Image: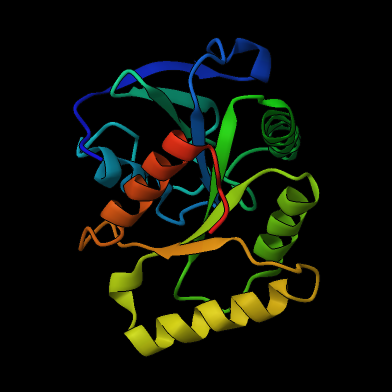
Amino acid sequence: MVIRSATFITSSSKIEQCPNPKLPEYAFIGRSNVGKSSLINMLTGIKALAKVSGTPGKTQLINHFVINETWYLVDLPGYGYAKTSRSNRASFSEMIKRYISNRENLHCLFVLIDSRLDPQEIDIEFVNWVGASQVPLCLVFTKTDKISSNALSSTMAKFSKEMLKTWEVLPKMLTCSAVSRTGRTEILSYIDEINRTGDTLE
């Protein structure tokens, strides 16, 4: 897939404010500081499309971008730690759950996982909730430039082992690095495949 255009549309604090669901939608989410904004900028080829910050929890709204005038890329608030009040964290959580559960044109949720870490309980819990909600998802292991290929394989194997405690069939798993720009083709090709076939399975 060639990205010819990527345009910011709107930021929403609740699902009712999101754009008309007339285009296929692909959302990106992960724990705070997992590298989500850097990945979105790498995918689109626009350096400052999504705001990059060293402060966890910087994204606090549902941000919509239209890509090639044919599909939406959505930057969701991170789950887990955020430098904000407890009441705001609760509202972020409810906003995320309502969007994921009810957004009718959400074709796939890309859940970003830090490849440098052993499986984190909050990631496993979130992925299990998404699966139980029957929302199509793809796991993307980020920051792969910071570890060896053997360490990456080990992380993915450990994560798979944890998921297989509750999953019969694992979702698709991809890897990426915003620094080395690896994984861009694979992620965009997967989106292109879903757009063409409507099928999120292997």
Q: Is residue 174 above or below residue 196?
A: below
Residue at image location 48% in from the left, 39% down from the top: 197
Q: Is residue 109 visible?
A: yes
Residue at image location 52% in from the left, 14% down from the top: 22
Question: x and y percent of residue 17 in the render?
Answer: 60, 11
Residue at image location 73% in from the left, 36% down from the top: 97
Residue nearest the viewer, comparing 64 with 202: 202
Residue nearest the viewer, comparing 196 with 37: 196
* Picture colour scheme: rainbow
Residue at image location 65% in from the left, 52% down from the top: 80
Q: Is residue 63 above or below residue 129?
A: above
Q: Is residue 137 left or right of residue 163?
A: left
On-image quarter of the N terminus: top left
Q: Quadrant of residue 176?
A: bottom left
Q: Quadrant of residue 106?
A: top right
Q: Is residue 45 left or right of residue 168?
A: left
Q: Is residue 141 visible?
A: no
